[in-house]
Image (tube, grey):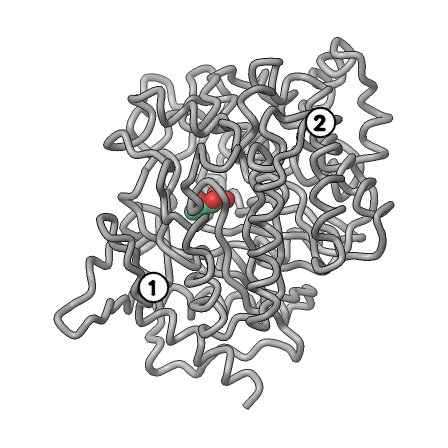
């Protein structure tokens, strides 16, 4: 790990956008306030036994009421952009039909507060919180959910479109599909294995519908966000190499190839075509719409993956934090990094450079890229006697990853921005409040915010760019 005190600050190209990121369910709270409808995450956390310690996002950071303070903190940190997500059930409580004016009013206030503070709002239109009413009608297995999404997006754009320059449609369709529909770790917790891929396709169809609505509404930059990571084979053994390729196809390329190349990887396309047809759709026709050109491609990066072909008799349970169902042709194994975050994730900044270069090499028409999430959970603890939260490991992590972005730029990848996950400590899905990714500490009892050392460090990095 490089020493941030001895390495110069990373230097990014002129015009490079620094940003911070959050998502509605992870920070807003106010889960049933002012007419908001329940989402699948409300149901999932309330079900019990799904999230560590039974934590929920009922209150979260109470961003719904405290947004002005957080916007001020983000702005004082010097970032150019702030990525946040809009909660579909706050705007359209039943998923389709009636609009909740108070929900739109809230996002109107957030957008204005950001703009007044000199920060560009970059909303994500869907960060996993599907209206529960739609889940009860099939959720992402129903084609009609994509129509409902287009309807919701039209309401949002109608209200905010005059002030929002960049829209991101969906966050990590891969993680939502695989963890929430294939496995049971995230909402809606269906555990359907590879049959979940149809839910992913309908999210991409919803993305396509949203792009159509946004284009028709007038000029803006439009993009989608996916998680990307290099997939390494555990050895040169052809069985491991083949397993790694199958894993990459199913978990990475199945979610970016449709958007950036208008196709699905081999092995994914065939079963999907049948499933789409059984739901009244046509895969080829859908792909034409899904591949409509974008202005920006959002890449979330956390760690690389290592894969081996399942070894007979080896027990993979508990090897990683997520148990992959038996019977699949691959097994994730720990990536051999020297250091890990307190969440147990590998620290491997070179994986970010590699992921960006791989994208550029795979897609001749790749739009300009923004790293829309990158960051680390370290258990920094509460403010010390001087009121400081010292988080040197997060600073080292961010410095190393910004240098990795510099390396990708040097290699010719058109990277236009880097957003830290996250602006503020928040609800980390199945891990609840045990994990803290924020540049700002939040006291869970009082909700008092304290900027960490990393917040000031990033502010200095941004200031140094113009120096
Ligand atoms: C990503 C999610 C984001 C956050 C980070 C740590 O997969 O998009 O909401 O939880 O992981």
Marks counted in the figure total: 2
Residue depicted at 16% across the width and 74% down the height: 386
Residue depicted at 43% across the width and 73% down the height: 458
Image quadrant for the C terminus? bottom right
Residue depicted at 43% across the width and 19% down the height: 325
- State the residue lying farthest toward the top: 278
x then y, percent, for residue 261: 78, 41
Q: Nearer the viewer, residue 186 or 132?
A: 132
- 400 shown above or below 337: below
Which residue is labeled 1 in the image?
Answer: 394
x then y, percent, for residue 376: 37, 55
Horizontal side of 253 relative to 241 (left or right) equals: right
- 413 shown above or below 292: below
Horizontal side of 264 relative to 20 (left or right) equals: right
Residue depicted at 79% across the width and 53% down the height: 364
Q: Nearer the viewer, residue 458 or 137?
A: 137
Which residue is labeled 2 in the image?
Answer: 148
Element under label 2?
helix
Mark 1 within 8 Å of ligand 1, using the beta carbon: no
- State the residue lying farthest toward the left: 385
Q: Nearer the viewer, residue 158 or 100?
A: 100
Q: Mark 2 vs mark 1: which is more N-terminal?
A: 2
x then y, percent, for residue 233: 49, 40
Q: Residues within 10 Å of mark 1 (few under 14, many from 20)?
A: many
Q: Is residue 406 visible?
A: no
Mark 2 within 8 Å of ligand 1, using the beta carbon: no
Element under label 1?
helix
- State the residue lying farthest toward the bottom: 467
Horizontal side of 60 relative to 419 (left or right) equals: left
Mark 2 vs mark 1, CA separation in Å? 40 Å
């Amino acid at each position: 790990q490089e020493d941030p005190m001895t390495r110069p600050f990373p230097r990014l190209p002129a015009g490079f956008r620094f940003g911070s990121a959050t998502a509605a369910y992870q920070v807003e709270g106010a889960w049933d306030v002012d007419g908001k409808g329940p989402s699948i995450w409300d149901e999932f956390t309330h079900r019990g036994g799904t999230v560590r310690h039974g934590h929920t996002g009922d209150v979260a950071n109470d961003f719904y009421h405290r947004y002005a303070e957080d916007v001020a903190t983000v702005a004082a940190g010097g970032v150019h952009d702030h990525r946040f997500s809009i909660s579909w059930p706050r705007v359209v409580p039943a998923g389709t039909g009636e609009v909740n004016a108070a929900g739109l009013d809230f996002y109107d206030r957030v957008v204005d507060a950001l703009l007044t503070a000199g920060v560009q709002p970059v909303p994500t239109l869907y960060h996993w919180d599907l209206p529960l009413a739609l889940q009860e009608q099939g959720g992402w297995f129903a084609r009609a959910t994509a129509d409902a999404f287009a309807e919701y997006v039209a309401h949002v754009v109608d209200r905010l479109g005059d002030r929002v320059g960049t829209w991101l449609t969906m966050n990590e369709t891969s993680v939502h599909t695989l963890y929430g529909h294939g496995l049971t770790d995230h909402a809606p917790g269906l555990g359907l294995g590879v049959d979940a891929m149809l839910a992913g396709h309908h999210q991409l169809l919803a993305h396509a519908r949203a792009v159509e609505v946004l284009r028709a509404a007038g000029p803006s930059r439009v993009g989608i966000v996916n998680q990307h990571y290099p997939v390494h084979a555990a050895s040169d053994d052809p069985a491991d190499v083949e397993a790694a390729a199958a894993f990459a196809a199913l978990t990475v390329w199945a979610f970016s190839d449709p958007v950036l190349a208008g196709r699905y990887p081999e092995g994914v396309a065939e079963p999907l075509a049948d499933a789409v047809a059984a739901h009244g759709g046509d895969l080829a026709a859908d792909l034409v719409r899904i591949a409509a050109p974008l202005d920006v491609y959002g890449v979330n990066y956390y760690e690389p993956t290592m894969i081996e072909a399942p070894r007979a008799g080896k027990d993979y349970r508990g090897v990683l934090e997520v148990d992959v169902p038996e019977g699949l042709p691959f097994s994730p194994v720990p990536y051999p990094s020297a250091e890990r975050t307190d969440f147990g994730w590998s620290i491997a900044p070179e994986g970010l450079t590699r992921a960006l270069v791989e994208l550029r090499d795979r897609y001749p028409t790749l739009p300009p890229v923004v790293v829309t999430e990158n960051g680390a959970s370290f258990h920094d603890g509460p403010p010390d006697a001087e009121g400081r939260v010292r988080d040197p490991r997060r600073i080292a992590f961010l410095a190393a990853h910004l240098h990795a972005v510099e390396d990708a730029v040097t290699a010719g990848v058109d990277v236009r921005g880097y957003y830290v996950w996250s602006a503020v400590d928040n609800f980390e899905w199945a891990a609840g409040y045990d994990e803290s990714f924020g540049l700002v500490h939040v006291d869970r009892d009082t909700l008092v915010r304290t900027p960490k050392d990393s917040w000031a460090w990033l502010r200095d990095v941004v200031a140094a760019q113009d120096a």
